[in-house]
Amino acid sequence: MIPIPNNTSPAVDNRTVTSLNKRPREAVDRNTVESLNLGPNAQTAAPARQPVPPRPNIPPQPVPQPVPQPTWQTPPPAQTSPVYQRPETPPSVYQRPTPQPRPTPQPIPQPVPQRPTPPPQPRTVPQGRPVPPPAPPMPPERPMPPERPMPPLVHKLQKGQKSNLAGPLQKLKVCFGWNVKDARCDVDASAFLVTDTGKVPGDEWFVFYGQDSSPDRSVSFAVTPNGADREEITVDLQRLDARIKKVVFVLTIDEAIPKNLNFSMLKDVYVRLVNGATGQELVSFTPAEYYPNVTSMTMGELYLYNGQWKFNPVGNGIHQDLAGQCAVYGVQIE
């Protein structure tokens, strides 16, 4: 039955209500309800509830568990090792200890055994052999020769400065002088008479202390015991052989190589050309250097050029003895 409120519904007779009750519930439509003048607050009857079919037996499903989400945690700060701080120390100067001198060990004196001296035995000479003579005494060392003063060199030439010999000339004196620093130095002057080939015609055209003149007697060697000059070589230009075109003058030290002697042991070396008739100096030359590797020196050359005699101060030193100079100009010596 549909409840109807009393305060809103009009008066309904019993017949109408009975007739409504006899109708099927499904035949009541909305128009019928409106004809009953139901107010706005009237409640509509609910339709009949249909039977609910039984639910199938569904096994219970496991409830999915929530996946735990990782929780980000801030890592703790890294433990840093403390920085070593060198303690401050007051500056100090290192004082090196003074070494103490070690005591010098004193050698223990050992007794020296005295060896008995045997008595001298008489010298026996085998029969038939003569007794050798005693060795000769050592020769005394050569005394230092006295120095000689250099003469005044008036017309000095430089090395390689060629000069004409002025005036009518017949004889020339080629004078040599020197002083030594070592008493073992024995200096000698010599002359090579060479042709236009640069060689001597023969061994006899070599003039020195062992062969004091040339074959034509035009060149001669002499030692001057007094005066400033020590040795001189005289050249007679009138008697000179026509084949001779040049006269070479050389200074050497006797046994320079075996005795280890050289020109550094000399001083005041010079050569000068003097007119044989008047004694007047024509030209002169002195070397500027005395090298320790020089044992012989070509002092100068007297040569004929276009009918005129000239002099060339060579001043060329070499490490050769007298035998080496002889080989240069073709002299054969034993």
Image (spheres, helix red, strand yellow):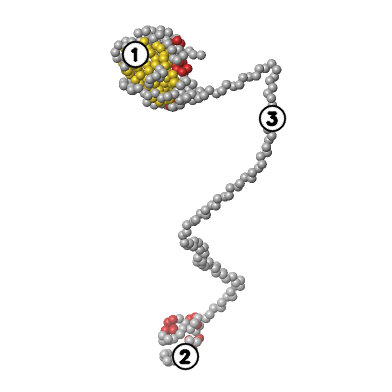
Spatial CA distance of label 1 from label 3 is: 74 Å
Residue 84: image location, x then y, percent: 50, 61
Helix, strand or loop at mark 3: loop
Counting residues from the start of the chain, the first of labels 1 and 3 encountered is 3
Of tags 2 and 1, which is closer to the observer? 1
Residue at 53% from the left image edge and 66% from the top image edge: 70
> Which kind of residue does numbered mark 2 sit on?
Arg
Of tags 3 and 2, the one toward the viewer is 3
| Residue on which the image places disc 2 | 15
263 or 279, which lies in front?
279
**Crowd rating for badge 1 (residues with CA inside 10 Å; few <14, some 14–19, many 20+):** some
Left or right: where does residue 120 sit relative to residue 35?
right
Tag 3–tag 2 contact (CB < 8 Å):
no
- Residue type at the position of mark 1: Gly
Q: Which residue is mark 1?
A: 276
Give amino acid for label 3: Pro
- Where does the image place residue 309, in percent across and percent down from the top left? 33, 13
Whether 149 is drawn above or below 71: the answer is above
Mark 2 or 1, nearer chain start: 2
Can you give x and y, in whole percent of width and height, for residue 304 in the image?
34, 12
Residue sitting nearer the eye, 222 or 9? 222
Evaluate whether residue 80 shows in this view: no
Which image quadrant is residue 148 in?
A: top left
**Which residue is painted at 40% across and 8% down in the image?**
217
Label 3 belongs to which residue? 119
Q: Is residue 139 above or below residue 192?
A: below
